[in-house]
Amino acid sequence: MNRKKQPLYKRIIVKLFGKFYYFYVTNFRRDIMKKSLSLRRGECNHCGVCCKGCPNLLKNNDCKFWYRGNCDNQCLMFPVFPYQIEFNSEDVRNNCGYYWEEKDKSWLSKNKI
Protein backbone atom coordinates (compact mmCIF):
# COMPACT_ATOMS: atom_id res chain seq x y z
CA MET A 1 0.00 0.00 0.00
CA ASN A 2 1.23 3.48 -0.79
CA ARG A 3 2.27 5.26 2.40
CA LYS A 4 0.67 8.51 1.27
CA LYS A 5 -2.76 6.85 1.17
CA GLN A 6 -2.50 5.52 4.71
CA PRO A 7 -4.22 7.55 7.42
CA LEU A 8 -1.94 9.90 9.35
CA TYR A 9 -2.38 8.04 12.65
CA LYS A 10 -1.14 4.77 11.07
CA ARG A 11 1.94 6.49 9.65
CA ILE A 12 2.67 8.01 13.07
CA ILE A 13 2.28 4.65 14.83
CA VAL A 14 4.58 2.91 12.34
CA LYS A 15 7.18 5.67 12.67
CA LEU A 16 7.06 5.58 16.48
CA PHE A 17 7.37 1.79 16.53
CA GLY A 18 10.38 2.04 14.22
CA LYS A 19 12.06 4.61 16.47
CA PHE A 20 11.53 2.52 19.61
CA TYR A 21 12.71 -0.65 17.88
CA TYR A 22 15.79 1.13 16.54
CA PHE A 23 16.59 2.49 20.03
CA TYR A 24 16.15 -1.02 21.49
CA VAL A 25 18.41 -2.66 18.89
CA THR A 26 21.19 -0.07 19.03
CA ASN A 27 21.32 -0.07 22.82
CA PHE A 28 20.28 -3.56 23.93
CA ARG A 29 20.53 -6.00 21.00
CA ARG A 30 23.99 -5.37 19.69
CA ASP A 31 24.07 -8.84 18.10
CA ILE A 32 21.29 -7.86 15.68
CA MET A 33 22.90 -4.51 15.03
CA LYS A 34 26.33 -5.99 14.34
CA LYS A 35 24.93 -8.58 11.93
CA SER A 36 23.04 -5.98 9.91
CA LEU A 37 25.98 -3.55 9.91
CA SER A 38 28.26 -6.33 8.66
CA LEU A 39 25.99 -6.63 5.61
CA ARG A 40 25.82 -2.88 4.98
CA ARG A 41 27.87 -1.52 2.07
CA GLY A 42 29.00 1.99 1.11
CA GLU A 43 29.84 4.90 3.35
CA CYS A 44 28.32 8.06 4.74
CA ASN A 45 28.72 11.03 2.43
CA HIS A 46 27.97 13.49 5.28
CA CYS A 47 25.23 15.25 3.34
CA GLY A 48 23.12 15.74 6.49
CA VAL A 49 19.87 14.76 4.76
CA CYS A 50 19.12 11.99 7.27
CA CYS A 51 19.65 14.48 10.11
CA LYS A 52 17.18 17.13 8.93
CA GLY A 53 15.21 18.43 11.85
CA CYS A 54 17.79 17.40 14.45
CA PRO A 55 18.57 20.26 16.84
CA ASN A 56 22.26 19.28 16.82
CA LEU A 57 22.65 19.86 13.09
CA LEU A 58 24.52 23.06 12.26
CA LYS A 59 23.83 25.28 9.24
CA ASN A 60 26.67 23.75 7.22
CA ASN A 61 25.20 20.23 7.72
CA ASP A 62 27.80 19.32 10.35
CA CYS A 63 26.71 17.82 13.64
CA LYS A 64 27.75 19.35 16.95
CA PHE A 65 28.61 15.90 18.30
CA TRP A 66 29.47 13.62 15.36
CA TYR A 67 33.18 14.35 15.08
CA ARG A 68 33.65 14.38 18.84
CA GLY A 69 32.11 10.92 19.17
CA ASN A 70 29.46 12.11 21.61
CA CYS A 71 26.47 11.08 19.46
CA ASP A 72 23.78 8.67 20.56
CA ASN A 73 24.08 5.14 19.21
CA GLN A 74 21.10 5.81 16.94
CA CYS A 75 22.99 8.61 15.18
CA LEU A 76 26.36 6.89 15.03
CA MET A 77 24.98 3.68 13.54
CA PHE A 78 22.31 5.04 11.17
CA PRO A 79 21.16 3.29 9.06
CA VAL A 80 21.28 -0.14 10.68
CA PHE A 81 18.50 -1.61 8.52
CA PRO A 82 17.73 -1.23 4.80
CA TYR A 83 14.17 -0.11 5.48
CA GLN A 84 15.49 2.96 7.28
CA ILE A 85 16.56 4.23 3.88
CA GLU A 86 13.77 2.72 1.78
CA PHE A 87 10.92 4.06 3.93
CA ASN A 88 12.51 7.44 4.59
CA SER A 89 12.10 10.62 2.57
CA GLU A 90 13.03 10.77 -1.09
CA ASP A 91 16.01 12.96 -0.17
CA VAL A 92 17.43 10.21 2.03
CA ARG A 93 16.79 7.50 -0.57
CA ASN A 94 18.55 9.55 -3.26
CA ASN A 95 21.51 10.79 -1.20
CA CYS A 96 22.46 8.10 1.31
CA GLY A 97 25.77 6.40 0.50
CA TYR A 98 24.84 3.20 2.34
CA TYR A 99 23.11 0.24 0.74
CA TRP A 100 22.49 -3.51 1.14
CA GLU A 101 22.75 -6.17 -1.54
CA GLU A 102 19.40 -7.78 -2.44
CA LYS A 103 20.47 -11.16 -1.03
CA ASP A 104 21.35 -9.51 2.29
CA LYS A 105 18.02 -7.67 2.41
CA SER A 106 16.19 -10.96 1.95
CA TRP A 107 18.28 -12.59 4.72
CA LEU A 108 17.42 -9.76 7.10
CA SER A 109 13.75 -9.97 6.23
CA LYS A 110 13.58 -13.79 6.57
CA ASN A 111 15.18 -13.58 9.99
CA LYS A 112 12.73 -10.86 11.08
CA ILE A 113 15.45 -8.30 11.61
Image (spheres, rainbow, N blue to C red):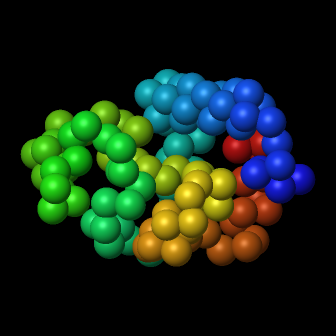
- Going 53% across and 43% down the picture, which residue do you hit? 33
- Going 66% across and 74% down the picture, which residue do you hit? 101
Which quarter of the image is occupied by the C terminus? top right
- Going 72% across and 63% down the picture, which residue do you hit? 105
On the question of residue 110 being in view, the answer is: no
Q: Could you say where residue 88 lies in the image, as x and y percent from the top left? A: 58, 55
**Extreme residue in the right direction:** 1
In the rendered image, the vertical position of residue 74 relative to residue 102, given as above or below: above
In the image shown, does 30 or 105 lie closer to the viewer?
A: 105
Number of on-image labels: 0
Q: Is residue 44 rendered to the left or right of residue 8?
A: left
In the rendered image, the vertical position of residue 2 relative to residue 34, given as above or below: below
Q: Give the image quarter of residue 55.
A: top left
In the rendered image, the vertical position of residue 53 relative to residue 79, given as above or below: above
- Going 76% across and 59% down the picture, which residue do you hit? 107
Q: Could you say where residue 71 lies in the image, as x and y percent from the top left? A: 24, 38
In the image shown, does 15 or 30 lie closer to the viewer?
A: 15
